[in-house]
Image: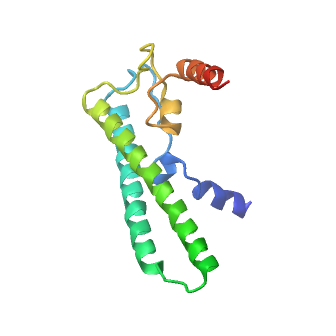
C-alpha cells in the first residue's frame, strides 16, 4: 500500500508536478472561464519551469561527469549516456516551445478548443495533456490517417 502511494506521487503527471488537484467544475460553470484558464496557466508554467531546470541540470551533469577515459569501451559508454541525455533534453526543448504556444493561447483566450473542429477539448483531457490542440475524436482520426500513410 505504501509503495502504491509513493508510485502515484512520483508519477510524471503534470498535475502532480504543479502540485494541483484535478479541477472541480462547478454547476453551470462556463467552459474555459477565468478560473479554469488560471488553473491551466499554473500547470503549464510549472511544467515549463521544471523542464528548464532539468535541461540546466543535464548540462551541469555532463560537465561534471565528463572524463577522458583511457579505455575506449568506457569512453563509448559515457558518450552513449551523454547522447541519450542530450536527446531527452532536445525533446524537452521542443515541449517547452509547445508549452509557450499554449500559454499564448491562454493569453489570447483561445485555449481549450479543438484546432480542427472547434469543439471543447475537455478539462480532463487538458489536465492529462495541457498542450493538446485536438479533441479526442480529431486526434483519433489523425492517428488513423498517420497509420494509413505509414503503411
Kindly give the residue lying farthest to the top in the view shown: 117
Question: What residue is drawn where x is 44% and y is 67%?
Answer: 58
* Residue 90 in the image: above or below residue 134: below
| Image x and y of residue 80, in percent | 57, 66
Residue sitting nearer the eye, 105 or 20: 105
Question: What residue is drawn where x is 47% and y is 60%?
Answer: 86
| Image x and y of residue 23, in percent | 47, 37
**Colour scheme of the picture:** rainbow
Kindly give the residue lying farthest to the right in the view shown: 1
Within the image, what quadrant is residue 28 found in? Answer: top left
Specify whether 108 is left or right of 114: left
Question: What residue is drawn where x is 43% and y is 62%?
Answer: 54
Residue sitting nearer the eye, 100 or 124: 100
Specify whether 100 is left or right of 16: left
| Image x and y of residue 14, in percent | 49, 47
Question: What residue is drawn where x is 60% and y is 19%?
Answer: 145
Within the image, what quadrant is residue 53 found in? Answer: bottom left
Kindly give the residue lying farthest to the bottom in the view shown: 70
Amino acid at each position: 500500500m505504501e509503495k502504491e502511494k509513493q508510485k502515484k506521487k512520483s508519477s510524471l503527471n503534470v498535475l502532480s508536478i504543479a502540485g494541483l488537484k484535478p479541477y472541480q467544475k462547478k454547476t453551470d460553470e462556463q467552459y474555459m472561464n477565468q478560473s479554469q484558464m488560471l488553473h491551466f496557466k499554473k500547470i503549464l508554467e510549472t511544467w515549463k519551469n521544471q523542464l528548464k531546470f532539468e535541461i540546466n541540470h543535464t548540462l551541469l551533469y555532463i560537465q561534471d561527469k565528463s572524463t577522458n577515459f583511457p579505455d575506449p569501451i568506457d569512453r563509448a559508454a559515457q558518450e552513449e549516456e551523454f547522447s541519450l541525455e542530450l536527446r531527452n533534453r532536445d525533446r524537452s526543448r521542443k515541449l517547452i516551445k509547445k508549452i509557450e504556444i499554449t500559454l499564448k493561447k491562454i493569453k489570447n483566450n483561445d485555449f481549450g478548443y479543438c484546432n480542427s473542429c472547434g469543439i471543447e477539448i475537455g478539462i480532463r483531457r487538458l489536465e492529462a495533456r495541457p498542450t493538446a490542440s485536438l479533441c479526442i475524436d480529431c486526434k483519433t482520426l489523425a492517428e488513423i490517417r498517420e497509420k494509413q500513410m505509414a503503411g
